[in-house]
């Protein structure tokens, strides 16, 4: 009985937390991040402020949670998916950039607002920014990890991750500031640069960014 009660309570807590996430996303999508307030979230979710604070100490904490689940965790999931589905680093990077480009093409107001929040958070909250940056580096180091000497001489997965994260941040800033930014072309260029400079020539079969024969 006790175990069942705890399980039900945890499920209810998870449901409320998810509902807060969902309503916050809808508010940001419909009216922008600046119009996201705790009062609006509580009204949309049908909870009191006291209940809200049981889950999130502040609006800022809620936004960090949204960024974690919708941006950082999803990116890590994508990396792990392509690592499981591929056998070579070349194929892994090819598959990753195809999927990453697809995601960018479908990003709207919600994702733009959250990415903008993340980037400004680097400056305003240095400790949090450092933690997020380290998460990003760890994710891309996992993408570049290879036990088969597939990286170009003198490179390791950490250095490749640092270069890639820096370039992606620059491309993302351009995308945020210019609605006509050719994001898919920029990502293609980044892939071609990585493919030509970071992968050992002996392991490259096809330098083009085309659909790999994997699910």
Image (tube, rainbow, N blue to C red):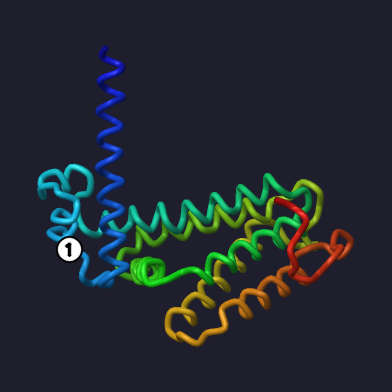
Q: Is residue 104 left or right of residue 143?
A: left
Q: Is residue 85 above or below residue 130?
A: above
Which quarter of the rendering shows the N terminus?
top left
Residue placed farthest to the right in the image?
202
x, y percent for residue 45? 19, 51
Which residue is at a point 33% across and 57% down the rendered structure image?
A: 64
Q: How many marks?
A: 1
x, y percent for residue 24? 26, 58
x, y percent for residue 19? 27, 48
Q: Is residue 205 above or below residue 78?
A: below
Quadrant of the image occupied by residue 98: bottom right
Q: Is residue 134 above or below residue 18?
A: below
Q: Is residue 15 left or right of residue 69?
A: left
Label 1 Cα neighbours within 10 Å, binned few <14 / some 14-19 / many ≥20: some
* Frontmost residue, 132 versus 213: 213
Location of mark 1 (residue): 37
Q: Is residue 28 left or right of residue 167?
A: left
Quadrant of the image occupied by residue 103: bottom right
x, y percent for residue 151? 77, 59
Which residue is at a point 31% across and 46% down the rendered structure image?
A: 18
* Frontmost residue, 167 versus 176: 176
Quadrant of the image occupied by residue 165: bottom right
Q: Is residue 48 left or right of residue 20?
A: left
* Frontmost residue, 188 versus 64: 188
């Amino acid at each position: 009985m006790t175990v069942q009660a705890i399980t039900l309570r945890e499920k209810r807590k998870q449901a409320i937390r998810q509902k807060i996430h969902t309503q916050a996303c809808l508010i940001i999508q419909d009216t922008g991040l600046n119009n996201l307030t705790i009062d609006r979230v509580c009204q949309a979710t049908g909870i009191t402020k006291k209940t809200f604070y049981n889950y999130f100490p502040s609006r800022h904490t809620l936004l960090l949670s949204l960024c974690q689940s919708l941006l950082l965790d999803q990116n890590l999931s994508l990396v792990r998916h392509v690592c499981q589905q591929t056998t070579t680093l070349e194929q892994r990077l090819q598959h990753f950039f195809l999927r990453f480009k697809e995601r960018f093409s479908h990003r709207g107001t919600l994702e733009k607002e959250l990415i903008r929040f993340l980037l400004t958070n680097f400056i305003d909250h240095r400790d949090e920014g450092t933690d997020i940056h380290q998460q990003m580096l760890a994710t891309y180091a996992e993408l570049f990890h290879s036990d088969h000497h597939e990286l170009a001489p003198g490179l390791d997965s950490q250095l490749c991750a640092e270069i890639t994260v820096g370039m992606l941040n620059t491309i993302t800033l351009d995308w945020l500031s210019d609605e006509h930014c050719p994001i898919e072309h920029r990502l293609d260029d980044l892939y071609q640069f990585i493919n030509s400079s970071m992968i050992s020539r002996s392991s490259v079969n096809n330098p083009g960014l085309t659909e790999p024969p994997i699910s």
